[in-house]
Image (tube, rainbow, N blue to C red):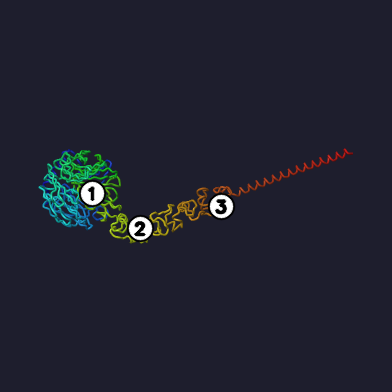
Amino acid sequence: MKKTPIFLVLLIIVSFMTYESNGQQYNTDKPISNDYNFGLKVKWFYDTGRTLLPEYSSPCIVDLDKDGKLEVIIGSSDYSLYCFNYLGHLLWTFDTGGMILSSPTVADIDHDNELEIIFGSYDRNLYCLKSNGENKWTYEANGEIYASASIVDLDDNNELEIIFGSLDGNIYCLDNEGIQIWNYTTSNSIYASSAIVDFNGNGKLEVVIGSSDNWIYCISDNGTLNWNYQTNAEIWSSPAIADLDDNGNLEILIGSDDKNLYCLDETGNLVWNYIMADIVRTSPSVTDLNNDGIIDVVINGWNGNVTCLNGNNGSLKWFYNTINGIFSSPSIVDFNFDGFFEVVIGNNDKYIYIINCLGKKVGSYYVGGWVRTSPAIGDMDKDGMPEIFAYTDDNVLYCLGLSTGSPTFKSTWYCFRGSIFHTGWMDSDGDYLDDLIEYSYFSTSMFDNDTDFDELMDGQEVFSYTTDPLNNDTDLDKIPDGWEITNKINPLFDDSLVDYDRDNLVNYEEYLLNTNPHSSDTDEDDLSDYREVYIYETNPLKIDTDMDGLNDGLEVLVFNTDPLNIDTDADGILDGIEVLVYETDPTTEDTDEDELTDGLEIYYYKTDPNNNDTDADGFYDNVEIKAGTDPLDPNSHPIKTFYLVLIIIFTTIITLGLLFVIVKQIKIIRKKKEIDDMLISIFMNEKRKQ
């Protein structure tokens, strides 16, 4: 028979007291509801079965099988760990002997290029599973395990260690084979998860953790106490680490049941504290929400407040009241990639809330069950849009998508404890590797999500592709990892001289040309990439190199046009227009041989470039144009004009002839008159002489 621990019974009672005291009534079904700016919708959900026990294991999302799409892992109070693919299909389960309240932690702990899953159970065992759900090893503690494990290279030996607390009061440090390296004993149960930090900058990390004995402990990498700080009540809150005042020194943020959120410096001295309205059992999250250069601290309260503090001095910036109690720790994401972050929380009023950087609700979704777990955020299906995962007390895992928003997003605190390493650090560059693990283990940039500039985020290289995030060409084949991944080539094997598509271009040449190494004809223009590059000098990435409306293959293989010249016959018409619109010959400037170029016929004379006598009047278009007649009008042709000209010429000749005769007769008459006048004169003169 499965027994429920006393503390959980008390938690359930307290939770119902909190719920009832607000006097609110809620429907326990699972209706769809969205409002405000970010519409939320269910993409899928999975009911793991009702146990009537609260769920505290927060979802973990990671690419377990390295296919580029994420899986989601969740522990349940029904003693089982579940793994689902991005579509919500159950891939496998792993059964333990107790409730699973800790959240899964994931890393490649043993350098085998396979991810391991670490989680604790109430059967007192810490489990290490392979990515397919098979048990790799188990470590038995002396008490139940509620807290989530942290995975880090604690002692700077390039090997990852596993840190976790137990209800037996011990803080355990295990190596990657599950063998205990050390343990540190506190005087009461440990429900909180640890945060990891390098306070002195020596490469050796310290463990910061709270205990229900009221103390905050800082433990060295070898398991000895560095310092401790006493609060006034037990501690369930897990700490967060950040340089809150931008002075180069790190601070610790942690809550206590004494209603305080504490900020301690690296030596364990109090920097500031903020008094909350109720006990603080959730864990703080940190990010510069409004891009003002100041780290903001977001903490949820059992009184229903989401509180945002100025990390520099602990002053209140805003709070949002949800009316009901909040056991969920906040996640932080910039949904629309505008530089301003949103806070995502689950609530005991059965809603998922999205709150903007000013403290205004900008989205919510009713899930039908209390949400004590922290939401996890990631792009499960690689469509550029984020999904939100929440596991409810009615044992339903929800995958919510945005119905509005940007196809690009950035998350700096994407799950419980900031990242799936559970170090308590934010992920400044949003590459799925928190800042601590980047600088202390992978040596990647905390502020550039692509350290080696290979167009793969550092987290993708670590989790999905096992490429080197510090080397943009892991296999040294002169082809960047990102190009190989995008084009489905193995980035871990030198295949630069391989010709997968048999187009006589090896992969290195395809990379230089940016052609598809798996397609001999990248642009699908019926010319192989090789022929385009080395024979026709066309662009293998462009179906129509000269942009004349004919693809390169048609130009070369069918129409015999020049794929590099938009107007092969220089007639003023694009080759594509000639072929597809006017059906003229793109290789000759005068298709109908009427001594008019096709361009002149189409654009100037408006004649038919495929008919040398457009108006069918028996005269070629060019003849009519030379004759001055209209080649588009069958009633206007050179014959009528000829006759008219002849008549005019004939009339003119006759007129001129008549004028000539008349003038000549006048001259004759005048001449005769002159002779007559002369004869008369002679006669008169002779007569006088007589």
> What residue is pinned by disc 2?
510
Q: Nearer the viewer, residue 493 or 632?
A: 493
> What residue is pinned by disc 3?
620
The residue at 22%/58% (across/down) is: 112
Instruction: Give the spatial CA distance, label 1 vs label 3.
Output: 82 Å
Instruction: Give the spatial CA distance, label 3 vs label 2.
Output: 54 Å
Badge 2 amino acid: Glu
User: Dot 2 lies on which element?
Assistant: helix
Q: Quadrant of the C terminus?
A: top right
Q: Nearer the viewer, mark 2 or mark 1?
A: 1
Callout 3 crowding tier (Cα within 10 Å): few <14, some 14–19, many ≥20: many
> What residue is pinned by disc 1?
435
Q: Nearer the viewer, residue 525 or 592?
A: 525
Badge 3 amino acid: Tyr
Q: Residue furthest right?
A: 690
Of mark 2 and mark 1, the one earlier in the sequence is 1
Q: Position of residue 258 (x, y in %)?
A: 13, 41
